[in-house]
Structures are given as structure tokens and as C-alpha cells.
């Protein structure tokens, strides 16, 4: 029911297919293993391209993590291939890692594994996903992720952004192809999201991350800044500069940490939150 897999190195000249059964005597074929009762999986530094398909029909929790200096982020096609094989997935964590958006999205088709052209891929709807936890995220990538992976029943989003939107870190992945970033007149809707937790080191990050996301059912918001200076605190951005629609009519809890809030800013903030 539970799997913990950590790959020490991904630089093998002849990589062994992961989670497959070794050939029997006199046979050279690696046979696919099947885990119908696997509910929880943790994959650390695991090359997703080496994982076979149709492994996790009952998987509820998937944790992807990357440690060390030689780690590489999976391509969006490899991540899509795995998530498409997890129809019951409810909890997804990506810790210090995230996909490379090196394949353009075809919004008119559903993901179909490896068939068809490989310069585009269809979307993968995460029908059961209720919680997403993602660390070391570039603010622009969040909108891309939900374009490739719609999450209609997502209830909890917990993200921490990299210190600066322009910084380059091993886990930062800016889309290489012009894909489905929303235009000025469009947005991505997360209709079931109830709780939003965000931590960031630059106020521009939170503006860029959420300005094209809609949260019509949001109950709880927690915003925290990691940028603490001895002589000053960062100012809290105006809600209309953070959210696509700043009128959070269902919000009953608001948690703020390491911010300077001016009196007029507080008055404006409360005007958008009638249920607080």
C-alpha cells in the first residue's frame, strides 16, 4: 500500500526500468509490475520517464521531491503520463521540483500518452485532486500548471515561491513554449478551492502568480512574506493587484505575516471581504 523510492543517481549509462520485474532465466524482457493496492507513493529524484504506465489505479497520495545538485526536473509529458495513470489521486506534493513546460498544450484534446505528435500534448484533468502542495515555484508556472492539469475539485493550494521571480534555481521551470498562459481578458477557474496558503520573498511574485486565477469559493487565505528586514517590512499589496477578482465574498479567515499595512490599505482590504 505504500512505496518510498529514492534514486541515488540518474546518470546511469544503461538505466534500469523502474518498478518492473527483472527478466526470468533465459528471457531478456522486463515485465511490468502492477500495484492495484498502492495508496501512497514517495518518489525522490526518480526519473519519471523510466516509470511504466498503468501502475497506480488506487493511488491517493503522490510526493515528488528533488534533492542534491544533480537533479533534473521532469518534462511536462512525463509528468502528464504519470498523472494520467492516477485517476484516484487526491494529494499531490512537488517539493523542490516541478515540470519543464517544453511541450505546447493542445487545449482541444485529452492527453493520450505517447500517441500522436510529441510537440504538443493534451490536458490531463485531475478529477479527484483535493490538495496541491508545491515548494520553490516560479510565479509564472502556477498558471501554466492548471492549464495543463485542470483541477475542478481542488480544495487546498499550498505554495511557496522562489525568492525572486527573476532568479534561476534548479527547481525553477519557466515554460519554453508559448502555451496556454491566460490573456488579459481570460482566467483559470478553481471553483472548489477553499484554502490558499502562499509564502513568497518578493511581493511581485504573489501578484504574478494569482492575477489570472479565480477562486469563487475561497474561505481561508494565508499570505506570508519571507523577506524580513531589520528596519522595514514589505508592504501588503492591494487585493485588486493580487487576485483576478479581489471580491472574496466567502472569505472568513485571513492570515498575514511579516507585512506592513497602512491604515488606508486596511480599509480597502476589508472592503473586499464582507464575510470576514
Image (tube, rainbow, N blue to C red):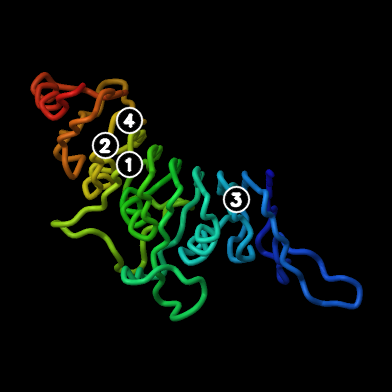
Q: Say whether marks 1 and 2 touch (CB < 8 Å).
A: yes
Residue 245 % position (x, y): 16, 41
Q: Say whether marks 3 and 4 touch (CB < 8 Å).
A: no
Q: Secondary structure at mark 3?
A: loop
Q: Nearer the viewer, residue 232 or 75?
A: 75
> For mark 2, does the 10 Å Cα neighbourhood hold few (<14), some (14 to 19), or many (20 or more) residues?
some
Residue 28 % position (x, y): 82, 77
User: Which numbered circle lies on residue 192?
Assistant: 1
- Cα separation, mark 2 vs mark 4, equals 24 Å
Q: Which residue is mark 2?
A: 217
Residue 265 % position (x, y): 12, 25
Q: Say whether marks 3 and 2 touch (CB < 8 Å).
A: no
Of the image marks 1 and 2, the number of the one nearer the N terminus: 1
Q: Looking at the image, is mark 1 or mark 4 nearer the viewer?
A: 1
User: Which numbered circle lies on residue 58?
Assistant: 3
Q: Quadrant of residue 16?
A: bottom right
- Cα separation, mark 1 vs mark 2, equals 6 Å
Of the image marks 3 and 1, the number of the one nearer the N terminus: 3
Q: Looking at the image, is mark 2 or mark 4 nearer the viewer?
A: 2
**In what quadrant of the picture does the N terminus appear?**
top right
User: Which numbered circle lies on residue 225?
Assistant: 4
Q: Secondary structure at mark 4?
A: strand
Amino acid at each position: 500500500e505504500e512505496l518510498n523510492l529514492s534514486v541515488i543517481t540518474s546518470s546511469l549509462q544503461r538505466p534500469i526500468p523502474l518498478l518492473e520485474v527483472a527478466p526470468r532465466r533465459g528471457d531478456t524482457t522486463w515485465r511490468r509490475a502492477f500495484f492495484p493496492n498502492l495508496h501512497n507513493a514517495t518518489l525522490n529524484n526518480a526519473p519519471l520517464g523510466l516509470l511504466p504506465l498503468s501502475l497506480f489505479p488506487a493511488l491517493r497520495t503522490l510526493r515528488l521531491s528533488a534533492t542534491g545538485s544533480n537533479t533534473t526536473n521532469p518534462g511536462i509529458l512525463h509528468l502528464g503520463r504519470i498523472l494520467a495513470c492516477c485517476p484516484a489521486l487526491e494529494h499531490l506534493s512537488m517539493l523542490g521540483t516541478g515540470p519543464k513546460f517544453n511541450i505546447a498544450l493542445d487545449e482541444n484534446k485529452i492527453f493520450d500518452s505517447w500517441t500522436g505528435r510529441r510537440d504538443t500534448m493534451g490536458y490531463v484533468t485531475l478529477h479527484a485532486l483535493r490538495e496541491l502542495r508545491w515548494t520553490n515555484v516560479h510565479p509564472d508556472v502556477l498558471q501554466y500548471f492548471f492549464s495543463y492539469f485542470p483541477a475542478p475539485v481542488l480544495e487546498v493550494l499550498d505554495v511557496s515561491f522562489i525568492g525572486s521571480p527573476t532568479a534561476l534555481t534548479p527547481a525553477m521551470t519557466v515554460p519554453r513554449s508559448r502555451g496556454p498562459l491566460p490573456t488579459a481578458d481570460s482566467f483559470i477557474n478553481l471553483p472548489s478551492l477553499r484554502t490558499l496558503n502562499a509564502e513568497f520573498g518578493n511581493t511581485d511574485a504573489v501578484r504574478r502568480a494569482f492575477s489570472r486565477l479565480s477562486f469563487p469559493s475561497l474561505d481561508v487565505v494565508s499570505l506570508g512574506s519571507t523577506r524580513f528586514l531589520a528596519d522595514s517590512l514589505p508592504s501588503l499589496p492591494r487585493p485588486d493587484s493580487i487576485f483576478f477578482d479581489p471580491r472574496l465574498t466567502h472569505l472568513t479567515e485571513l492570515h498575514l505575516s511579516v507585512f506592513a499595512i497602512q491604515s488606508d490599505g486596511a480599509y480597502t482590504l476589508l472592503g473586499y471581504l464582507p464575510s470576514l
